[in-house]
Amino acid sequence: MGRISLWSLIIGLALLAGCASNPKADFAKQSNEVCKSYDPQLAFTLGQLSAAAYENKLSKRKNAVARLDFTFDREVQDPDHGTQGFLVYNDKIAVVVLTGTEDVKDLLKDAQVWTQEGTKDPKCGKKVSIHNGFYQALSNIKKDQSLFQRLTQLQRQGRKIYFTGHSLGGALAAILAYFTSLDHPDIQVAGVYTFGQPHTGTSSFQKCYDARLKNRTFRFVNSDDAIPRIKPTDNYEHVGIPIYFDSQGKIVEEADFSAFNSVGSFIDSPFINDHDISNYLNHLEKNKNNHPFSCQ
């Protein structure tokens, strides 16, 4: 079974069952910290870096990064689990970019809906439960002390630290940002921007993550993209602040989306196309001068 048909089966069954999540953004109710943290031009740049992560050759990734005026620092990967990404920087920021779903191995990783319990987080007093496939995908990267030493060095040189990714890459970026905050408190996570990110964990993870990073985490959802809306089980919850694009690429607080009521409506839906990173980039570029949050 090919990638698209497998996605179609998994997503179709979930959405036909009505297992979808669609929280409201409430732009006016967000804190002033959120307003100051969000940068629409940075969102577009991080979207471009997330797209560059899909280049299948290292030389092409480096060229794509250079065109964006970033320096390619190192690969961030775990060959044992197929996890890929890279670290780049410019004069102002350093960015950890994780790669999204590309092959059957990634799909099997995505499909592991049971959870892995992490250590107790003193910030919220709970042990967090994280999607097992995503947790395992980062198990070796979390132990890569050279990566965190480099992030510390880049931060000391005056750069802010960001995490980003599309699809699976977005989920991994959010989880890695969380563990960076938890295990390496000297590294200040300036922001997390994800695109088409699936759910990453249960309500325990959502509460602990948001206690640390909610006001700096912006989770973009494009129109009828179904991937961010599927709840693997009822106790999964999204982290961060959602930012929705409608079908015309306008930023809205709440996207019109409901579970499909028939196989026909599912087949005719644009959910696969709306998940594509190129469509996210188109909308991000349209809104790179549009700030939806109210600043005081």
Image (spheres, rainbow, N blue to C red):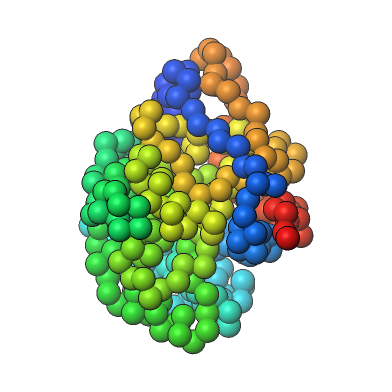
Q: Which residue does the image show at 52% across and 75% down from the upper left?
A: 160
Q: Which residue does the image show at 33% across and 70% down from the upper left?
A: 184
Q: Residue furthest bottom?
A: 157
Front in this rendered view, residue 136 or 28: 28
Q: Which residue does the image show at 61% across and 27% down from the upper left?
A: 257
Q: Is residue 136 left or right of residue 218?
A: left
Q: Is residue 143 left or right of residue 269?
A: left
Q: Is residue 160 left or right of residue 203?
A: right
Q: Which quadrant would residue 146 be assigned to in this image? A: bottom left
In the rendered image, the vertical position of residue 271 relative to residue 30, given as above or below: above
Q: Quadrant of the C terminus?
A: bottom right
Give the tally of numbered discs: 0
Q: Which residue does the image show at 24% across and 67% down from the upper left?
A: 143
Q: Position of residue 173 (x, y in %)?
A: 43, 57
In the rendered image, the vertical position of residue 37 relative to residue 103, given as above or below: below
Q: Quadrant of the N terminus?
A: top left
Q: Which quadrant would residue 251 be assigned to in this image? A: top right
Q: Position of residue 19 (x, y in %)?
A: 45, 24
Residue 36 visible in the displayed image: yes
Front in this rendered view, residue 189 or 251: 189
Residue 164 visible in the displayed image: no
Q: Position of residue 4 (x, y in %)?
A: 46, 34
Q: Position of residue 141 (x, y in %)?
A: 29, 64
